[in-house]
């Protein structure tokens, strides 16, 4: 028997890759599409699945629309990937970030509890909850210390998921995902900002790239790998929380070196540091320990950072040439 899924944030990077994965597994896929946003269906089109998903007009800030979405889709699995997910903007929009990325999770869980309490639920938590790290490598037992309104909002979403799991015996799991990128990443994120600039500089359309903290270190993986871990969590007999990461950390500086070197350029000739791009409170290092996901889910990342960055640069070279 085929299964039905409902994805919030289906027009984002993770939502598009997850929709493609679920369609390949025979799911009927519904996606929540808030009409207050501009056309962001390009990611679904890029993966060739835009005609196969069913979009529902709903929003994480509106409980009634979420209830109607549950009634329409009658999902077996719900994946909450919707959020105000750009960390830097969360200082400028702290209330919106809290409402969508935090309270929005409670609204979605409440809609699910009212309409389809037996459905399985996935919450997209984040390594930004660790923030000012309390351990060299972060795993499921590492204390949280968020350093941005985004991280704080996501921490509420994480704990309300745990609370609904324990209070109402719902099959609700959280994936504490470390940074994951792809050619579908938005231009506001540093990896895509770099790869797009590399393409433009190589093709003579741009001269330099302005960045903030070049020494910040992140555990970067490929979003296409990470959505498989999301699906695997909801296939387990019991719900739980899992860190999803590569177990390796790389500085923004070294990421730039990889990207520029791929097209035969030296990043030092083109990258300039702009103090205005530093975060008000920086997260200096993130390094995940995915051992539990490996052991219990059988999940390991397939794509190296070098493969990921060259994939993104090549995609941006094609886009810039085409445009």
Image: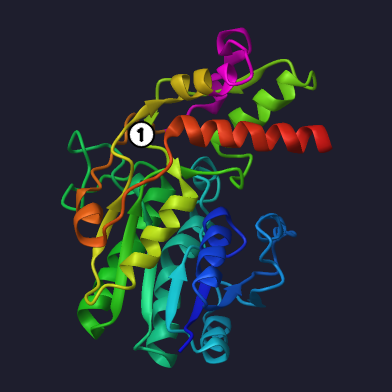
- On the rendered image, what quadrant is the N terminus found in? bottom left
Which residue is painted at 66% across and 55% down in the image? 43
Q: Which residue occupies the foreground of this view, 145 or 238?
A: 238
Considering only vertical position in the picture, is 129 above or below 104? above
Horizontally, is 56 left or right of 151 in the view? right
Return the x and y of residue 270 as percentages of the image width and height: 63, 12
Crowding near the residue tagged with mark 1, few <14, some 14–19, many ≥20 C-alpha atoms within 10 Å: some
Q: Does any portion of residue 161 appear in the rendered image?
A: yes
Q: Which residue occupies the foreground of this view, 301 or 164?
A: 301
Q: Choose top left, top right, bottom left or bottom right for residue 311.
A: top right
- On the rendered image, what quadrant is the C terminus found in? top right
Let me know if residue 271 is in the magenta part.
yes
Which residue is painted at 64% across and 74% down in the image? 53
Q: Does any portion of residue 214 appear in the rendered image?
A: no
Considering only vertical position in the picture, is 13 above or below 18? above
Q: Which residue occupies the foreground of this view, 160 or 170?
A: 170
Which residue is painted at 56% across and 84% down in the image? 69
Considering only vertical position in the picture, is 242 above or below 199? below
Horizontally, is 35 left or right of 130 in the view? right
Query: Quick one: SS at disc 1?
Result: loop
Which residue is painted at 30% across and 55% down in the image? 299
Return the x and y of residue 99 as percentages of the image width and height: 48, 64
Q: Which residue occupies the foreground of this view, 14 or 275?
A: 14
Number of dots carrying numbers: 1
Q: Which residue is mark 1?
A: 283
- The residue at the far top in this view is 269
Return the x and y of residue 230 as percentages of the image width and height: 38, 62
Q: Choose top left, top right, bottom left or bottom right for residue 77.
A: bottom left
Let me know if residue 135 is in the magenta part.
no
Considering only vertical position in the picture, is 272 above or below 281? above
The residue stretch that appears in magenta:
259-280
Return the x and y of residue 80 as percentages of the image width and height: 46, 68
């Amino acid at each position: 028997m085929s299964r039905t899924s409902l994805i919030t944030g289906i027009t984002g990077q993770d939502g598009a890759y997850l929709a493609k994965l679920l369609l390949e597994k025979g799911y009927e896929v519904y996606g929540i599409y808030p009409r207050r946003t501009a056309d962001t269906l390009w990611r679904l089109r890029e993966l060739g699945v835009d005609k196969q998903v069913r979009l529902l007009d709903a929003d994480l800030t509106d409980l009634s629309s979420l209830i109607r979405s549950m009634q329409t889709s009658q999902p077996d699995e719900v994946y909450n990937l919707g959020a105000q997910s750009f960390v830097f903007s969360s200082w400028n929009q702290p209330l919106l970030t809290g409402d969508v990325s935090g309270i929005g999770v409670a609204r979605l869980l409440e809609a699910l509890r009212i309409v389809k309490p037996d459905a399985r639920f996935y919450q997209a938590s984040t390594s930004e909850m660790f923030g000012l790290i309390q351990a060299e490598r972060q795993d499921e037992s590492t204390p949280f210390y968020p350093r941005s309104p985004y991280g704080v909002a996501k921490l509420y979403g994480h704990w309300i998921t745990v609370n609904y799991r324990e209070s109402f015996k719902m099959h609700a799991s959280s994936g504490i995902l470390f940074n994951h990128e792809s050619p579908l990443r938005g231009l506001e994120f540093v990896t895509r900002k770099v790869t797009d600039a590399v393409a433009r500089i190589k093709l003579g359309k741009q001269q330099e790239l302005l960045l903030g903290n070049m020494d910040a270190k992140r555990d970067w993986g490929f979003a296409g790998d990470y959505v498989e871990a999301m699906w695997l969590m909801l296939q387990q007999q019991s719900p739980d929380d899992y860190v999803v990461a590569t177990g390796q950390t790389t500085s923004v500086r070294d990421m730039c070196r990889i990207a520029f070197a791929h097209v035969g350029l030296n990043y030092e000739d083109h990258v300039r540091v702009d103090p205005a791009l530093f975060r008000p409170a920086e997260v200096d290092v993130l390094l995940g320990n995915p051992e539990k996901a490996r052991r219990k889910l059988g999940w390991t990342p397939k794509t190296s950072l070098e493969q990921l960055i060259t994939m993104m640069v090549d995609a941006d070279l094609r886009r810039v040439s085409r445009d």
